Image: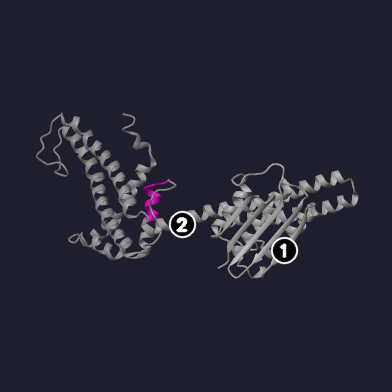
Amino acid sequence: MVRFLRPLSRGTTYTRLVHLWVPMLVVSVWLFIDMSTPWVPALVLVPLGLVPSVRRGEGVQARLLLTPGEAEPGISEAPSATWRDRWRTVLWLQLRMVLGVACVFATVWLPIAAVELARSAWGHTPSGMPLPGRLPPHGTWVLLSPLPLLVLYGVVVGLGELITVCARRLLGPSAAERLAALEERTEQLLERTRIARELHDSIGHALTVAVVQAGAARAAGDPQFTDRALDAIEETGRAALEDLERVLGVLRETERPVSARPTLADAGRLLESARASGAMVEAEVTGPVTAVPGTVSREGYRILQEALTNVLRHAGAVPVRVRVAVTDDLLALEVRSPLPGAIPGPGRGSGLRGIRERAALLGGSARTGPDEGDWQVRAELPIS
């Protein structure tokens, strides 16, 4: 019994009832003008439903009154983008009016019927609306007086559920809207993944440099070396803070375009940072680095940053050979260093995995692992 009466305690039941009543306001106004043509409002709804913005208004009403509080109600708030959406809106308006008329008649005449049955039990003759006037007065009618109220309860709850189902079908997102929403969601996930990679590369590089410099300064016991180490830690930390602030800015303002990311033209600071950490970096750059397209150049910078970070983290102050070669259609990056004691396998480590994923996203390839007695990171990224 409690479960049967549970809809009475839900606010959604009453907001849906209001939604069903709203169309009758228009019908009532027209009936005051001309009661002989009650079909005119339904006729007017046809051109009205073809207006693209009407679908937006109906969607807002449906979400507010039929599915209040639902995060994903399955009802669109976008204007009609195709003729199919417009005709779906026309059908929705017609159906909404029909169900609204049925609901209003039920909510008006069923309570009156309950009252008339109760009055008949006390000897009153029904007036004829909605019960027939020839209904003989009898005391047993009082037992039937709750029946119209139960029917009213079922009609209100049932019509509320029915119009909600129809709203999801007729006002639900079209195939184009669902595709656009899926693409937007995919872009958001890709952006989050990219931000996570950038934080890993930038902050991880800064912390690695700081740890290596601090350890080297403590072991050296030389004031001049310590000063240089502190300068390198300060510079690397400042660059990491700039990257962190930029990434947080992107998170705070999701519509702001991503810009000012470092490119291969800024690779000099990576090499100097590695040299300041004790690594003996030998760099060879061939080809016009500044002519590399922005996306490829930015991802190339991150690949080079992660490769140098891995050298400092796993091998320490060792000789490092860096080669950057730019041709008409290819950017080749190679970082070689002596093999460390513990060799991370090709599939281990989020940094190495990130290098391969960055290359794959640009249609290129990357290889990480032992090669001829060295540890090699090699990436080839197509330019055109």
- Indicate which disc residue 183 carries: 2
Q: Percent from the top left, x then y, of residue 290?
A: 66, 69
Going by the image, does 139 lie left or right of 7? Answer: left
Which span is picked out in magenta?
59-69
Amino acid on which the number 2 mark rests in the picture: Glu
Is 104 left, or right, of 335 in this rendering? left
Query: Which residue occupies the foreground of this view, 66 or 322?
Result: 322
Which one is in front, 338 or 172?
Answer: 338
Instruction: Give residue 51's position: percent from left, percent from top.
Output: 34, 65
Magenta-drawn stretch, dominant element (helix, strand or loop): helix
What residue is shown at x 11% (from left), y 37% (from top)? 135
Crowding at mark 1 (Cα within 10 Å: few <14, some 14-19, many 20+): few
Applied colour scheme? one colour
In the image, residue 279 lies at what x, y percent? 78, 53
Residue 257 visible? The answer is: no
Amino acid, disc 1:
Glu
Which residue is identified by label 1? 284
Q: Is residue 75 left or right of residue 121?
A: right
Q: Residue at 61% of width from left, 44% of height from top?
A: 348
How would you rate the neighbour count of disc 2 (Cα within 10 Å): few for under 14, some for 14-19, many for 20 or more?
A: few
In the image, is 281 to the left or to the right of 31?
Answer: right
